[in-house]
Image (tube, rainbow, N blue to C red):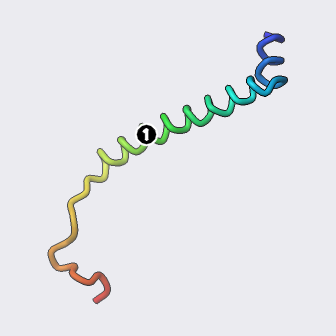
Amino acid sequence: MDELFNFLFGTRTGVAVLFFAGVLIFAIVAFVLEKRTHKIYVDRGPRPDDEDGLF
């Protein structure tokens, strides 16, 4: 374990691996949450009486 932590936090390559792994994890989480949100809130389009939006 000591070698793993030294690699991840002590070398430039290890820090890059941590960075890109974090970006990948956040991208996967965002994708899954977007799919769940899209399934819950279905886009029904604009309302027929809503032409300008203000009045």
Q: Is residue 45 above or below residue 25?
A: below
Q: Quadrant of the C terminus?
A: bottom left
Residue with the most extreme bottom position: 55
Residue visible at 15% across and 74% down?
48
Q: In which image quadrant can residue 49 be found?
A: bottom left
Residue visible at 43% across and 39% down?
31
Q: Is residue 1 above or below residue 31?
A: above
Under circle 1, the secondary element is: helix
Q: In which image quadrant can residue 19 be found?
A: top right
Q: Is residue 3 above or below residue 10?
A: above
Circle 1 crowding by C-alpha within 10 Å: few under 14, some 14–19, many from 20:
few
Residue visible at 19% across and 72% down?
47
Q: Where is residue 50 drawn, in percent x and y?
A: 22, 79
Residue visible at 78% across and 10% down?
1
| Apparent side of residue 1 relative to residue 28 in the rendered image (left or right) | right
| Apparent side of residue 53 relative to residue 25 in the rendered image (left or right) | left
Q: Is residue 3 above or below residue 49?
A: above
| Apparent side of residue 36 relative to residue 29 in the rendered image (left or right) | left
Q: In which image quadrant can residue 33 be found?
A: top left
| Apparent side of residue 15 relative to residue 52 in the rendered image (left or right) | right
Residue with the most extreme front position: 13
Q: How many marks?
A: 1
Q: Where is residue 46 drawn, in percent x and y?
A: 22, 69
Residue carrying label 1: 31
Three-letter code for the amino acid on which mark 1 is drawn: Phe
Q: Where is residue 17 drawn, in percent x and y?
A: 67, 26
